Image: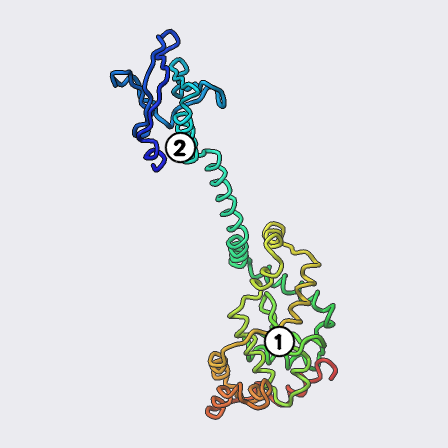
Amino acid sequence: MTALQKYARLEAVGVWRESDQGQRRDVIVSIGDATLVITDSQEKALAHWSLAAITRVNPGLVPALYHPEGDKTESLELPEDEVAMVEAIETLRRVIDRRRPKPGRLRLGMFLTVITLIAALAVFWLPKAVIQYAVQVMPEVKRVEIGQSLLNHMSGFTGPPCASNFAQPALRQLSQRLLARSDALLVLPSGLDTTRHLPGSLMLIGRTLIEDYEDPDVLAGYILAEQLRSEQQDSLQTLLSFVGTLNVFRLLTTGKLPEATLTNYAQSLLLADPHRIDYTDLKTRFAAKGISPIPYAYAVDLTGEQTAELIDHGQTGQFKPSLQDAYWVRLQSLCGG
């Protein structure tokens, strides 16, 4: 300790008493290795006080009076002319006190660390964990119910799905051909230009995909692309990430989500841009269904530059139309177009 080295040769004269009933004795006081050494005139050691355990009885007063911590009967008195020794003892006591562990501060630091850790878990880990758990335990019947509820809220912006006894068989046939389900496709009359997927394996199609193109393979391409998105991005997980952790807890405990929240999400879903997909994966879908990707490729990019991979793939292979001409004509009348 630097402070100890500074006072290593310092000595002073004082009065020491071993106990309340003991005799007052003139002594020599010096600073040793982390101790206050008290000796008689013959340099015989009478006491060693730990510098870390010295208490001053009368701070600021003279003569300075000390005793070892825990024993008030033993005392040391330094007269007012021994200012250097008094200052040395006080300096060393302050240095030691600063280095002494502060239990209160330690407890406060530990408490703040724990609180920070809990807060970090609540902010970063808990929401993802709760959402993942909800996605895993949600039964299919509940997914269908949530998807239907979202569709109802979405209809406030788009109008109800198009329906026509004449055209409906064509839509069911296309759904069966592409998705192996006859009831997976719904066509919205407005508010949607391409496709979206909802919980419960519902896929929404914008009316323009039916009415603005002459080739049904364009629509088929958008459906296959959306099917790929639905497998890469769980629609229920996307919804739960939007509604927030408290509403996810509410869904798990009550089975319901706030109506206003569903309305906001429905609008957000309509306005969002579909995330990009890998055309390598998509051309595999086209090949599996025996459908040419070329009409879809040029619908996405008139120049064909961005979809060249699909166009090249469409130059070879045997393809069949996704829908026969007669059914395509019927489907184009689904929304009264």
Residue at point 34% right, 34% down?
A: 6
Residue at point 64% right, 73% down?
A: 204
Question: Whole-percent x and y of residue 171?
Answer: 64, 79
Question: Whole-percent x and y of residue 27?
Answer: 32, 16
The residue positioned farthest toward the front in the image shown: 81
Residue 20 or 235: which is nearer the viewer? 20
Q: The residue tagged with tag 1: helix, strand or loop?
A: strand
Residue 162 makes an appearance in the image: no
Residue 240 or 151: which is nearer the viewer? 240
Instruction: Please tell me the numbered disc located at residue 288.
Output: none
Amino acid type of disc 2?
Ile
CA gap between label 1 and label 2 equals 73 Å
Q: Is 79 located above or below residue 84 in the figure?
A: above
Position of 262 with respect to 126 (left or right) is: right
Q: Is 137 located above or below residue 289 in the figure?
A: above
Q: Which residue is mark 1?
A: 195
| Quarter of the rendering containing residue 70 | top left
Amino acid type of disc 1?
Thr
The residue positioned farthest toward the top in the image shown: 21
Residue 95 or 294: which is nearer the viewer? 95
Label 1 vs label 2, nearer the camera: 2
Q: The residue tagged with tag 2: helix, strand or loop?
A: helix
Question: Whole-percent x and y of residue 332?
Answer: 68, 85
Which of the marked residues, 1 or 2, is nearer the chain's N terminus?
A: 2
Circle 1 residues within 10 Å: few <14, some 14–19, many ≥20: many
Give the quadrant of the C terminus: bottom right
Position of 268 with respect to 296 (left or right) is: right
Residue at point 48% right, 23% down?
A: 59
Residue at point 54% right, 50% down?
A: 122
Instruction: Please tell me the numbered disc located at residue 96.
Output: 2
Question: Whole-percent x and y of residue 326?
Answer: 64, 89
| Quarter of the rendering containing residue 91 | top left
